[in-house]
Image (cartoon, helix red, strand yellow):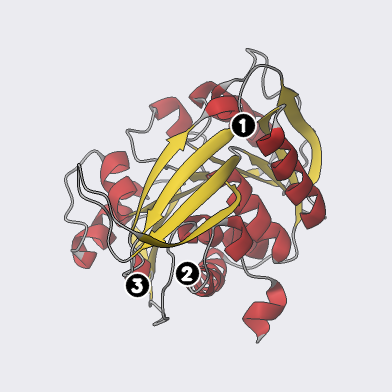
Amino acid sequence: MTRIVCVGSMNMDMAAYSTTLPRPGETVFGTSLVSSPGGKGLNQAVAARRLGATVAFVGNLGRDDAGDAVAAFLADEGIDMRRIERLEGVQTGAAIILVDAASQNAIVVIPGANMAWSEAAPGPLKLQAGDIVVSQFEIPDAVIIAAFTQARAAGARTIFNAAPARAMPPQLLALVDILVVNEVELAATSGQPIDATDVTALTDAAATLSQGARAVIATLGANGAVVAVNGRPTRIAGLPVPAIDTAGAGDCFIGALAASLARGETLEAAATFANRAASLSVTRKGTAVAMPFAHDLDA
């Protein structure tokens, strides 16, 4: 059975909803407050698991109340937690998320335990050919490179989410089989200025970045996504939905993509499925708790 191994971040999220996002120096009244486990790695793992995949997680939590809550949530989701370390003297990662009435968000992440790995991390992952290893930029580059090097040696595939947006180290890029980015992350990874509202320019940039053996998927929010392989792009249409909260939508896309690939779907079919799952996730408040189950998509 294909296993998804997520080497990544875990947070406790606090999301505040208001009519508008505050400007610098401004205070606004909010309408509601939601606390839930999150972090890009955790969100992606939960999305994959809820859609039927076998998922193991490799990461760090603090030995604190937030870490206890995150660990309990993952256990309830049925995710293999044997490679999650609980660290003394380091707080569990946290994120403060502000969401306005147009579902736009602003996020501040406090990495905490997500950046506190030993020099020997992540250790042996015991991968098999066909497994899928997923990671993101919310943990140290050295850990990602070590995990992806093991994946390459074992014949496992790698999915990398270049988020938060920054330049991609060449050593890491060489180990990525499927690169998933949004509009801002695509510009940062390509090293070229791109108008985030210009879908044609974004499509061309994804195609250019996919030259060679690497596949690139650019998620474009309401405009759907672009799947580019060997310089040839394919557009996936956006799905009109009443968006409430877009935080975690990209993570949902990646988890659903991995789950679909684990079932043996083609990349384009998997991306189409992931687009459906992400579209449903934005109709709900929260991050990991908003990830859909398979029966939700069937309905």
Mark nearest the camera among 3 and 2 is 2
Q: Is residue 3 visible?
A: no
Residue 48 lies, in percent from the top left, at 67, 58
Asked if residue 284 lies left or right of residue 295, the reply is: left
Name the residue that disc number 3 marks.
222
With respect to residue 286, does 119 lie above or below? above
Mark nearest the camera among 1 and 2 is 1
Residue sitting at the far top: 119
**Residue nearest the viewer, comparing 295 with 289:** 289
Residue 136 lies, in percent from the top left, at 51, 40
Q: Amino acid at mark 3?
A: Ala
N-term-proximal mark, 3 vs 1: 1
Total marks placed: 3
Residue 21 lies, in percent from the top left, at 28, 56
With respect to residue 119, does 276 lie above or below? below
Task: Name the residue at 38% across, 60% down.
Answer: 30
Q: Are marks 1 and 2 in contact (CB under 8 Å)?
A: no
With respect to residue 182, does 90 lie above or below? above
SS under mark 1: loop
Q: Amino acid at mark 2?
A: Val
Q: Residues within 10 Å of mark 3 (few under 14, many from 20)?
A: some
Name the residue that disc number 1 marks.
92
Quick one: quadrant of the N terminus? Answer: bottom right
Name the residue that disc number 2 marks.
282
Task: Name the residue at 57% across, 67% down.
Answer: 270
Task: Name the residue at 49% across, 74% down.
Answer: 283
Mark nearest the camera among 3 and 1 is 1
Cα separation, mark 3 vs mark 2, equals 10 Å
Quarter of the view holding residue 61: top right
Cα separation, mark 3 vs mark 1, equals 33 Å
Asked if residue 28 lies left or right of residue 114, the reply is: left
N-term-proximal mark, 3 vs 2: 3
